[in-house]
Amino acid sequence: MSGPILDISRLMLRFGGVTALQDVSFSVENSALNAIIGPNGAGKTSLLNCVSGVYHPQQGRIVFDGQDVTRLGPAARTRLGIARTFQNIALFRGMTVLDNLLIGRHVHQKTGTIAGGVYWGRGRKEEIRERERVEEIIDFLEIQPWRKQVVHTLAYGLQKRVELGRALALDPRLLLLDEPMAGMNAEEKEDMARYILDINEERGTTVLMIEHDMGVVMDLSHRVVVLNFGQKIAEGAPEDVQRSPEVQAAYLGGHAA
Amino acid sequence: MSPSDTFPKLLLQNAERLGDRAALREKDLGIWRETGWRRYGERVREFSLGLVALGLQRGGTVAIIGDNRPEWVIAELAAQSAGAASVGVYQDSGLTEVLYVIDHCDAKFVIAEDQEQVDKILGMIEQLPKITHLVYSDPRGLRRYSHDKLISFEEVERRGRELHAQRPELFAQNVAQGKGGDLAMICYTSGTTGSPKGAMLTFANLLTMAMSLHQVDPRRPTDEFVSFLPLAWIGEQMMSVATALAIGFTINFPEEPETALHDIREIGPNVMFAPPRIWEGLHSTVQVKIMDTTPLKRFLYERLMPVGRKVADLRLEQRPVPVVWKVLYFIADWLLFRPLKDRLGLLNLRSATTGGAALGPDVFRFFHAMGVRLKQIYGQTEISGISCIHRDERIRFHTVGEPIPGTEVRTSERGEILSRSPAVFVGYYKNDEATRATLTDGWLHSGDAGYLENGQLVVIDRLKDVLRLADGTQFSPQFIENRLKFSPYVKEAVVIGQDKPYLGALVCIDQGIVGKWAEKQKISYTTYTDLSAKPRVYDLLQREIDRVNQTLPDAAKIRKFVLLYKELDADDEELTRTRKVRRSFVEERYAGIIAGLYGDEQKIAVDTTIRYQDGRTARIQANLAVREMGAA
């Protein structure tokens, strides 16, 4: 309702002689659930990395919620409300689920090292409040049975869920998901799809995800951006994009009929 | 009018009497949150009046489907307060069963827990024309659903508050109109054959049961109970609703079904009722953990557990415990049993019961050894869940105990267990034919075969699975086989005897355990076939069978047995994939051996080929020994 939360214009990203992204522009409406698709090496993850601040594009502008964030680092963008998950799980493997999620809350903690260390007054109150927030996420993702288990002992699908939980702990307004369902079985995918839908519908969080499973993309997303060789070749509602000859050609490697 | 003859009346009394004492406790967001009795009463009032405002009438039914949550029991009591009966639907049952039960019980209201259950019902809403309202308690994922029959739990409560403001006397009037003879619930039993049947139970039925049980297994108002088994099951209704209201103790709801065992540890319940699989699960968890623990702990476990078993056996046999053993037990208790019970959450347990199926004696002894006096309960939904229970001073593992006060139990000429008490149900809902087949002159036909032994009931098997010897003596092959399999040395057993003069058994030894035993005894062997033919292995198994024979009536003891030269195998079609013996197949395949069991020969010549799992075949020529019991 309040216009786009993310506006990307004329993005250009080069690694030496390789052009990863070329003149990519699109925007994401507030509270939307959009997907980026494209063949391998199309630049999807690079694009996500530009949004989260890992890469800095040579040209173009990224505007998040009316603020130009192109030059900001990842931590600053996180504080503004951009969170992400990774293609390969990036959790603290030796720590419990609870601790991993609490770390996600760290960005919102105001108590300093000393006040926090004393665990008295403000630090304690904050700790209780943060734990409450984390418990809500645990409840939301239905991971209560594993709350106190060390992450690396969990099944892969569960670790993915925990990673999503940590991203949620950042209280994001824009959630970037890099292949949230990679390597999952049908049942895990179904669960994950439900969580993503619920995050979008219940919490009103804007979601931008990269996903290869076309069934998931078609069922979940409101709009789809298609990349091929660093260029945006199509954008629109899932069913329109699916019918587009360019997209079919990009995926099948042939020429548009 | 009796002041406490219905559940809602008891609830209001408890609200008055116990005030803010905890009635319900639910773990939410990692913290146990309490609902006092007064608040429990208010929530029931709000929801009940909400249902009334939406058109619930006296004599109606309300179907409830979902995991164990406060809202489940609140919905149940709300329906009952309005003069309607509650119908629990198993949350994990298949769609056809959900459809059948909800349609058959004529419910206009369905109370569903969450999106999962709502999806189930909405998917079949066309086939459920009687439903006027589908209420959900967890709004998660349902925000965008728009269906004119869908309404939230909170909205129903809000309407209830409105109605209460307009007519503050209505709820109390509704409750006061209830009578003990009113229908409280329809409990559908998932029959193994045909459609489920709905047993109609009145408040009088259920409260009689609760008070009779209380007499022999007392509850206290300070007790804690964890509700983690389906509330659609009569066993859970007995505890979490009927008894909890009658006595006024606290019910705890786990965070999620998966966290139940962990939550049990946090609560440390005083009363626990669970089917065998839960007790077996606890038992095997301990076994596995002990294998992984430090040598010192394992040493203590291995030394002190026998002390517990010895003292438990003495107590069970009601023999005096010598002072030495008392001292040893005291040490074992502090070093092992108390820490162990603490780990399992059983430290405060006063009343531990198992029901629904038979529990192996090893598991029974394990719990008794550490001081948990586990007792068996037996009953049917149709008798409000219980007719027999072990008495503290007379626990025998192979029986299901003695009838509870007010209950008569006898066996019919066919050997069927019959019971009669004020807790016996009124009949099946809309199924007079089934009612007539089950109830005669107030006697409830259980469909189970059994017999009484010194006042204690022994359940043999389902009546239809019972076979007869040539002289007409009944026996249950499965019952005896299960008893045999309680021995660690027995892997499989097939008991033969239909139309035969006596019982014979084909026994398969457990190669791992018998092999280990043989090593310790310095008996050398090569293959399974070789091991199973050793005379000393025969002696060993004979002792095991003898032990089982002691618990069997004289006419139905095993007279002869052979140890098979191979294990029964699903690949050979001798077992089903769930490892049940395919009796007729086995009897045909081993017809020669079976004939040998009923001949005079000491040996049966066997000449057969067996196929190994890798596809190789081997010819076996052997003389299989037939062992006559009591002969060695």
Image (cartoon, rainbow, N blue to C red):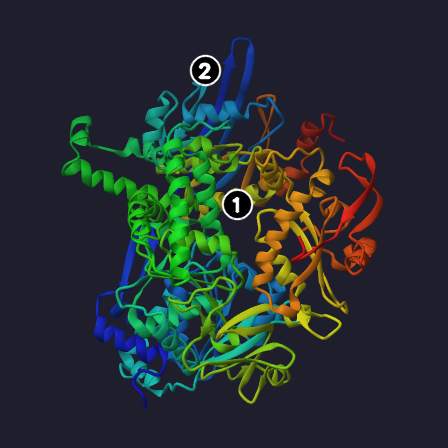
> In the visual, does B277 lie left or right of B196?
left
Position of residue A116 relative to residue B27, above or below, is above
Q: Which residue has dot 2 on it?
A: A58
Quadrant containing the N terminus of chain B is bottom left
Position of residue A16 relative to residue B432, above or below, is above
Pick whichever of labels 1 and 2 is earlier in the sequence: 2
Callout 2: chain:
A
Position of residue A247 relative to residue B500, above or below, is above
Q: Is residue B530 visible?
A: yes
**Pick the front one: A254 or B73:** B73
**Secondary structure state at the residue bearing disc 1:** helix
Q: Position of residue A163 (x, y in %)?
A: 44, 34
Residue type (three-letter) at the residue carrying disc 2: Gln
The quarter of the picture where residue B209 lies is bottom left
Q: Residue furthest top?
A: A16
**Secondary structure state at the residue bearing disc 2:** loop
- Name the mark on residue A226: none
3D distance between C-alphas at marks 1 and 2? 39 Å
